[in-house]
Amino acid sequence: MIDEDLPPKRGDAAGQLSQESLDSYSQHELTARIRLLESEIDRVKAHFSRVAEHRKAADALFSPRETD
C-alpha cells in the first residue's frame, strides 16, 4: 500500500478537541480548559517566533550578498 511508505501522520489534537461536545463540562471545567488552551496558544506562538528568527538568520547567512 502507498501509505505504508509515508511517514506517520502527526496527530491533530486541536482538530479532535474542536469535535468534542462541551455539553457535559461545568463552568469551572470550561474555565480551566480555556486557561489550558490559552497557555498552549502562547507556547505555539513562542515557538513560531523562535522558528521565524532561526529562518531569518539562516536566510541572512545563506542568501547571496550584493557587491558594489
Image (tube, grey):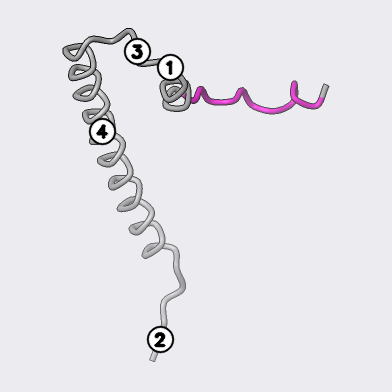
Left or right: 25 with respect to 10?
left
Q: Which residue is mark 2?
A: 67
What kind of residue is marked 2? Answer: Thr
Residue where numbered disc 1 is placed = 20
The Cα atoms of the two marked residues, 3 and 1, are separated by 9 Å
Judging from the image, what secondary structure is the residue with disc 3 in? loop
* Residue 15 screen position, x and y as percent: 47, 27
Mark-to-mark CA distance, 1 and 2? 57 Å
Real-space CA distance between mark 4 and mark 2, rounded to the nearest whole angstrom: 40 Å
Report which residue position mark 4 lands on: 43
Q: Residue at the location (53% across, 25% down)? A: 10
Q: Mark 3 against mark 2, which lies toward the viewer?
A: 3
* The C terminus lies in quadrant: bottom left
Tell me which amino acid carries mark 4.
Arg
CB contact under 8 Å: marks 4 and 2: no
**Amino acid on which the number 3 mark rests in the picture:** Asp
Disc nearer the start of the sequence (3/2):
3
Name the residue nearer the viewer: 14 or 68: 14
- The mark that comes first in sequence, 4 or 1, is 1
Give the distance between the C-alpha atoms of the residues marked 4 and 1, in whole angstroms: 22 Å
Q: Nearer the viewer, mark 4 or mark 2?
A: 4
| Residue 14 position by quadrant | top left
**x%, y% of residue 58?**
39, 57
Disc assigned to residue 23: 3
Mark closer to the chain start, 3 or 4 = 3
The magenta stretch is 2-12
